[in-house]
């Protein structure tokens, strides 16, 4: 009776890997694919690459993917930011983002080191509630997991379901983020909020800049906020934002106001403005922003857009130290509902 070999038990993909590993051109192939940095699903480009003489524009060499490159293609990283799709590319993006954010707080990469003394805030802005969902609450002191939704009095929703959950969910439990009652949950508002979250953030930055005007009048300078932010999904599938926000002086570009400065210069704000002052301003500005979406064609219904009550705003570790300066009068927060915004189109959340 014939006996099967090891290769007979391997899949087609595994046999291809063995042939590649035993090839005489393995080192050439590894060098060719090194630029993908381990990308799991690289883009495969075909065509030709021309080497051009810079001074004359003359083509001095041409390489064709079909005849001059292993596999007949040029591999390029996919560049996806999602670790669930391509972990190597997501890690590259994460490391690059870290370096950019670090430079914005401490200097480097063309940013002056003086920014380390600017007031800076780490802010977290979340969506409002669209209905109770399963959650996992951990006591920060004891580390114990609390019951999901414990209530002294069991309440039934209009659909007859008890809005109670006594389970202590594990970290990756599949029910986390799911509504306690699917019929009560405002799914439409949830979807619309994600679609308009980018516009809400834009209006929030405008509110921050408006809120700086009392300080501008007090200190006789023009101020601006500079920020880096990321948008990510909570377990319930709603977008929320994390942002590092820095306070700068706006360079003068008007000769009538004094010496013209480099418009790209990063100038320090008055030393009397502390990180705590700036954090309080950011929190108040974010809480003041709200507007109504356009009426939707199918229903004519509009949805309110505003941040949830859990607005976290705290000075960063590199922010200006606390002092006891003379404080300006509390700024007034203008309405942000003068006219409906333009539809967001196909822009991703956080754009």
Image (spheres, helix red, strand yellow):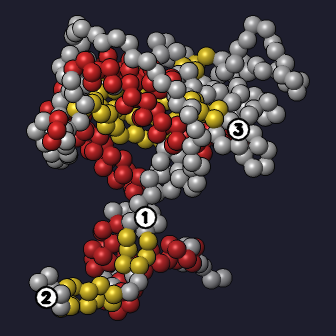
The residue singled out by tag 2 in the image is 56
Give the image location of residue 323, x and y in percent: 21, 10
Residue 201 placement, left or right of 308 = left
Report the front residue among 257 and 333: 257
Measured in 3D between alpha carbons, the distance from the residue under mark 3 to the one under mark 1, in whole angstroms, is 38 Å
Q: Are marks 2 and 1 in contact (CB under 8 Å)?
A: no
Q: Are marks 3 and 1 in contact (CB under 8 Å)?
A: no
Tell me which label, 3 or 1, sits earlier in the chain. 1
Relative vertical location of residue 231 with respect to residue 61 in this rendering, above or below:
above
Label 2 secondary element = loop
Report the front residue among 227 and 47: 227
Mark seen at residue 78: 1
Label 1 secondary element = loop
- The image shows a total of numbered marks equal to 3
Relative vertical location of residue 318 with respect to residue 226 in this rendering, above or below:
above
Q: What residue do we see at 69% from left, 30% from top? A: 130
Q: Residues within 10 Å of mark 3 (few under 14, many from 20)?
A: some
Measured in 3D between alpha carbons, the distance from the residue under mark 3 to the one under mark 2, in whole angstroms, is 61 Å
Tell me which label, 3 or 2, sits earlier in the chain. 2
Give the image location of residue 79, x and y in percent: 41, 60
Relative vertical location of residue 206 with respect to residue 285 in this rendering, above or below:
below
Task: Residue at the far front: name it.
Answer: 256
- Residue 65 seen by the camera: yes
Quarter-wise, where is residue 332 in the image? Answer: top left
Mark seen at residue 302: 3
Q: Nearer the viewer, mark 3 or mark 1?
A: 3
Label 3 secondary element = loop
Q: What residue do we see at 53% from left, 46% from top? A: 349
């Amino acid at each position: 009776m014939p006996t099967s070999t090891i290769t007979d038990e391997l899949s087609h993909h595994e046999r291809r890997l063995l042939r590649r590993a035993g090839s005489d051109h393995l080192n050439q192939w590894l060098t060719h694919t090194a630029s993908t940095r381990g990308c799991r699903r690289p883009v495969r480009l075909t065509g030709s690459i021309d080497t051009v003489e810079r001074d004359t524009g003359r083509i001095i060499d041409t390489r064709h993917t079909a005849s001059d490159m292993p596999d007949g293609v040029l591999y390029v990283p996919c560049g996806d930011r999602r670790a669930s799709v391509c972990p190597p590319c997501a890690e590259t993006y994460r490391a690059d983002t870290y370096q950019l954010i670090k430079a914005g707080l401490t200097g480097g990469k063309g940013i002056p080191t003086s920014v380390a003394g600017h007031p800076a805030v780490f802010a977290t802005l979340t969506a409002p509630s669209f209905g109770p969902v399963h959650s996992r609450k951990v006591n920060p002191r004891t580390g114990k997991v609390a019951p999901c939704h414990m209530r002294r009095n069991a309440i039934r929703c209009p659909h007859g379901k008890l809005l109670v959950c006594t389970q202590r969910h594990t970290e990756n439990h599949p029910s986390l983020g799911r509504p306690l009652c699917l019929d009560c949950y405002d799914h439409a508002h949830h979807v619309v909020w994600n679609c308009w979250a980018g516009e809400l953030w834009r209006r929030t930055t405008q509110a921050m800049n408006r809120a700086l005007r009392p300080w501008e009048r007090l200190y006789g300078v023009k101020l601006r906020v500079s920020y880096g932010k990321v948008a990510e999904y909570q377990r319930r599938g709603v977008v929320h934002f994390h942002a590092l926000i820095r306070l700068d002086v706006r360079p003068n570009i008007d000769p009538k106001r004094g010496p013209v400065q480099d418009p790209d210069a990063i100038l320090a704000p008055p030393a009397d403005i502390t990180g705590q002052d700036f954090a309080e301003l950011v929190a108040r500005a974010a809480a003041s922003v709200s507007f109504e979406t356009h009426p939707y064609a199918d229903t004519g219904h509009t949805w309110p857009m505003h941040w949830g009550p859990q607005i976290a705003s705290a000075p960063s570790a590199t922010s200006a130290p606390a002092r006891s300066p003379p404080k300006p009068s509390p700024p007034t927060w203008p309405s942000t509902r003068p006219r409906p915004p333009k539809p967001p189109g196909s822009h991703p959340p956080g754009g």
